[in-house]
Amino acid sequence: MLLSVCLGLHAQPLPASVRGQVEADPFKNVPAPWREYLLQARRAEDIADPLQRCLAYPDLPGNRWPPGHARAHCLDHTVQAMSMEDARKLLETGRVGELEAYLRRLEAEHARPIDPSEELHYFFEQFESEDADEFTAAWLAAQPDSPYALTARAHFHSGAAMRARGGAWAWKTPPEAMRRMTAEYDLALPLYRKAVRLAPRFVEPWDGMLELAYRDSREELEKEAFKAASAIEPGCRNLAKIRMASLEPRWGGSYEAMLAYAEQLKPLLATRPLLASQIAAPFGDRGNMLISSKELGREAMDVLDVAVRTGSNEDYLEDAANVAFNAEDGARDEWKALGYLLQGSIASGVERAAG
């Protein structure tokens, strides 16, 4: 099973030097520290239940994840928010009160001092989809003063803004695409504003405004939204994720600013262990930028090693495995790549099972 997982995750066949050893004796000639890691991983792979398998998986060699982070990461991947289709059924059958009650419960669970839930954010992020137009419009028409309906509709326009802009660098994006993006954000902003007037401590619209602000270069709004969201829940992982993204050099920030924000997050780890993934962001982003520049060497490997040993993030693990498999200098390490690919597969397996 170990080999099949690795083959399923890696886009290309394993190198012959690795394949031959795996087929003959999986760990006979594996060097330390990866031999012990793979032995423990094989034992975990024998566990049928995906969540228990995730919880039993060994730490990466040199791991510095904070206490509770691995457990929180595994459990987070089991979270299944109400689907848009189920929400639509409640609206169409006159049971919108049940939808609102569900969201009030998610707000309370998000604010728990220990083991807060991210289900609130997972519910609302689905409304950024193009498919959310009809439902979010109908929900808002039925409940024009609902902060939840307002936020869902605002998220739809924010998603439309990003679709209008596209994924290219700003200097490669046509001015007309940028204008369409701003026009959609102009539709989203008053909806977010009304939502926070009606529910000042509802963090989701503040998060939406923060993302809107940095993507559309609205500096004063960015400061306002970050200050407001931080006052409500400074340890909100979604807030930390958006804030870290806004501080990336590609968005006009700097690694110094990202590292400074990471220091602000560290005292919150005792009750918010998932924040370790965001504390890893300066290193993960630097590694990703080096890969984008086709610099697959020692510097990329070093920063990505720090990233994946600081916090769990499947994107960083994938990037780290990519460099370890393909490095053009002494950073190449096929067994490390194998370990990173395995580690990145565990939580996604839990997610597939939960779905």
Image: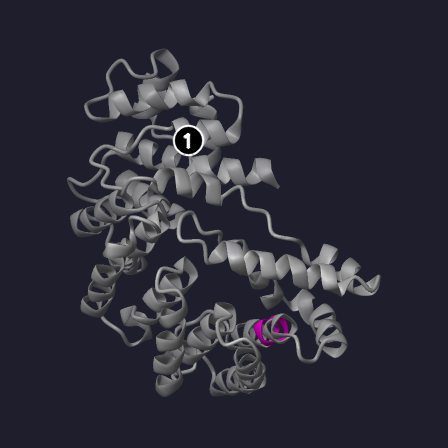
Classify 152 as above or below 121: below
Classify 305 as above or below 157: above
Residue 131 as seen in the image, left or right of residue 41: right
Residue under the point 35% across and 76% down? 227
Residue under the point 77% across and 59% down? 90
Question: Most prominent secondary structure in the magenta stretch?
Answer: helix
Frontmost residue, 201 versus 256 = 201
Place of residue 153 in the rendered image (x, y in percent of width and height, measured from the top left): 63, 74
Classify 316 as above or below 74: below
Amino acid at the residue labelled 1: Leu
Q: Secondary structure at mark 1?
A: helix
Number of residues whose C-alpha sits closer than 10 Å to that of mark 1, classed few (under 14), some (14–19) or many (20 or more): some
Query: Quarter of the image holding residue 244?
Result: bottom left
Q: Is residue 154 magenta?
A: yes
What residue sits right under mark 1 in the picture? 55
- In this picture, which residue range is highlighted in magenta? 152-156
Residue under the point 70% across and 80% down? 144
Residue 194 as seen in the image, left or right of residue 44: right
Query: Quarter of the image holding residue 105?
Result: bottom right
